[in-house]
Image (cartoon, rainbow, N blue to C red):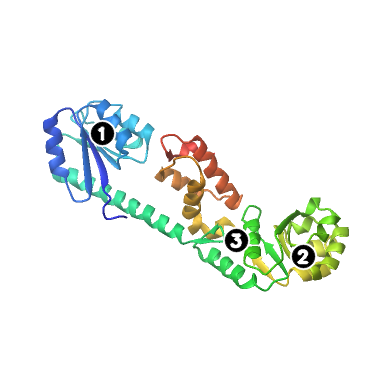
Amino acid sequence: MNPASNIVLVIVGDNTGSLELLSSAVARAGLSIHTAVSSDEGLALVLREHPHIVLADSPDPLLADRIAAFDPAIDVILMTREYSDDAAITAVRKGAAAYLKKPIPFGALNEVLGSLFEAARRQEQTDALEAEILAGSGFQGMIGRSPAAVEMFSRIRRIAPCFRTVLVSGESGAGKDSAAIALHNLSAGPGRLITVRCAEMENELLRTSGTLFLDEIGAMPLPQQAMLIATLPRVHVIASTSRDLRPLVARRLFREDLYRAITTLEVHVPRLGDRAEDLPLLTRHFVAQSRAPIRRITRRARAVLARYPFPGNIRELREAVEHACAVAQHNRIDVSDLP
């Protein structure tokens, strides 16, 4: 976190005397305090300052709900003279960080506030660290710092300068096309990268000069496979597959000589489930690519993304973030924005 940055606290009360007393009692280094003397003024202040924490010494029972509707990631401490266990349970279930009975010992208040302050500071540090890591974790347009991603990047870097044919394997949506682009960009292959959808390919495409990216080579018809064998000595080929080709060879649906030729060198693109450490970086990367002015992702939205298995891999994550950015309100992504 930038040392000059502060954790923002908004205190909402019903008189200036109590606001001054509370401000003085909770003041600490790194805490920027703003005050409001009514719930309406307090909500306007929350909308403008987007604080980390709100201390609500207000008789308005709906203030916490209105703050949560704006951003549920804001920690709200409620203070009231009309304390009851049922009301406290309800408030916490609805998202309040604490529900305190007045008159409040300032020691107890500072203990609660101190815990939230440290949590907010850690989150700020995490956000800053993620941004710093993201800036240094790109490889030919791909993002990753996990061991699986680093191994893939390393293998691409080693193979790219010397291959004539290479197989890129991995599940659908894992990013095989991005790996193919990286291989071509770092290679000595001729011309541009020409993508060919093997299920729809035409014979003329095999006569094209350049590096061929044969997408889903397992779907290539046998006649085109024979033509490809004859073409291989004259072109650079990057083939991709999300299927195990060996059963196709055994069933004579894929030529064995072609299988041997394209599997001499292989790059495996790991599924997202095998590189879970990269999920926060990829999420931030896709948010940054959006034109929407998204400033943050709430903690509970992050938790939902972390728990979801993403069977569609990086493609599904990108689509989920694009959807959330399109429908999100108040420049933040919450659970309700996720598809």
Mark linked to residue 270:
3
Q: Amino acid at mark 1?
A: Asp
Residue matched to label 1: 85
**Separation of disc 3 and disc 2 at Cα?**
19 Å
Mark linked to residue 161:
none
Q: Amino acid at mark 2?
A: Arg
Q: Is residue 76 above or below residue 286?
A: above
Question: Disc 1, disc 3: CB below 8 Å?
Answer: no
**Separation of disc 1 and disc 2 at Cα?**
65 Å
Question: Disc 1, disc 2: CB below 8 Å?
Answer: no
Identity of the residue furthest to the front in this view: 191
Q: Residue at x 60, y 49 (%)?
A: 315
**How packed is label 1: few (under 14 Cα within 10 Å), some, or many (20 or more)?**
few
Mark linked to residue 246:
2
What is the secondary structure assignment of the residue under circle 1? helix
Name the front one of labels 1 and 2: 2
Q: Pinpoint residue 142: horizontal percent, then vertical percent.
A: 56, 58
